[in-house]
C-alpha cells in the first residue's frame, strides 16, 4: 500500500479499547500498546533497586518515561504528517494524543506490579514481577491485534512468538547485565 493510500493518522483504525473509528476501511492498531509494553520492560530491566524509595522511584520512572515517549510520538506524528503551509489544529493534536495514549497505559500494569511488591516482596522480586507483566502484556497485545485483523492461527502464534522473543531478549539482558 503506498503512503498516499494510507488513511490519515488515526482514521480507519480500531483502538486497543476495541472501539472502531469511523472510516470505510478498518485497521487494527495496537502499535502503541506493544511499543509501550516493550518500553516498560526495558525500563524495568534497567532500573536499579537502590535509592531511598526504590519502588516509588521505579513507578515514577515508568510513568515519566511513558509520558515522555508518548509526547515524543505525538510530536513525531504531527511533524511527520504536517500539511505544508498549515499549522496543527487542536483537533489533530488531540487525535494524535489519544491515539498514542496506549504507550502511557502500557506502563500502568508494570507500575502496579511494582506497587504490589510493597506487600511482602523484595524490590528485586517486584522488578521481576513487573518485567513479567510487561512482557506478557506485549505478547497479549500483539496476539489480540492479529486476531482482530483476522489473521490465521499460525500468524497469531507467530506474532505472539516474535513478541515473546523480543521480551525474552530484554529479560536476558537483565540477567546478563544486572543480576
Image (spheres, rainbow, N blue to C red):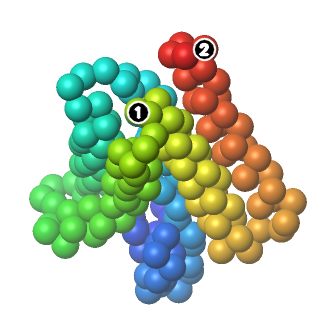
- The answer, for residue 170, to whether it is visible in the render is yes
**Residue 47 occupies which quadrant of the picture?**
top left
Residue drawn at 57 percent across, 70 percent down: 28
Residue drawn at 76 percent across, 47 percent down:
161
Left of 60 or right of it: where is 172?
A: right
The extreme front residue here reads 120
In which quadrant will I find the N terminus?
bottom right
- Pinpoint residue 156: horizontal percent, then vertical percent: 77, 61
Tag 2 residue? 176
Assess disc 2: are there few (<14), some (14-19) or many (≥20) residues with their C-alpha within 10 Å of its C-alpha: few
The residue at the point 48 percent across, 57 percent down is 33
Q: How many marks?
A: 2
Q: Earlier in the sequence, mark 1 or mark 2?
A: 1
Residue at the far top: name it: 177
Residue contact between numbered discs 1 and 2, judged by CB atoms under 8 Å: no
Crowding near pointer 1: few (<14 within 10 Å), some, many (20+)? Answer: many
Q: Secondary structure at mark 1?
A: helix
Q: Position of residue 42 (x, y in %)?
A: 47, 33
Q: Quadrant of residue 169?
A: top right
Residue 25's place in the image compared with 96, above or below, is: below
Query: Real-space Cα distance between discs 1 and 2?
Result: 19 Å
What residue sits 52% from the left and 64% below the top?
29
Tell me if residue 19 comes above or below residue 48 in the rendering: below
x then y, percent, for residue 64: 24, 42
The one nearer the camera, 21 or 158, is 158
Q: Which mark is residue 123?
A: 1
Amino acid at each position: 500500500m503506498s503512503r498516499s493510500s494510507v488513511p490519515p493518522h488515526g482514521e480507519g483504525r480500531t483502538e486497543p479499547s476495541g472501539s472502531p473509528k469511523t472510516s470505510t476501511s478498518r485497521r487494527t492498531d495496537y502499535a502503541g500498546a506493544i511499543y509501550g509494553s516493550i518500553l516498560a520492560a526495558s525500563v524495568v530491566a534497567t532500573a536499579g533497586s537502590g535509592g531511598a524509595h526504590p519502588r516509588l522511584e521505579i513507578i515514577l520512572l515508568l510513568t515519566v518515561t511513558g509520558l515522555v515517549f508518548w509526547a515524543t510520538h505525538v510530536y513525531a506524528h504531527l511533524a511527520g504528517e504536517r500539511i505544508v503551509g498549515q499549522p496543527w489544529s487542536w483537533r489533530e493534536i488531540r487525535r494524535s494524543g489519544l491515539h498514542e495514549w496506549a504507550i502511557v497505559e502500557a506502563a500502568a500494569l508494570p507500575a502496579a506490579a511494582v506497587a504490589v511488591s510493597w506487600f511482602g516482596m523484595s524490590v528485586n522480586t517486584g522488578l521481576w514481577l513487573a518485567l513479567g507483566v510487561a512482557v506478557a502484556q506485549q505478547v497479549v497485545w500483539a496476539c489480540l491485534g492479529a486476531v482482530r485483523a483476522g489473521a490465521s492461527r499460525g500468524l497469531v502464534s507467530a506474532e505472539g512468538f516474535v513478541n515473546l522473543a523480543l521480551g525474552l531478549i530484554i529479560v536476558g539482558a537483565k540477567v546478563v547485565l544486572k543480576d
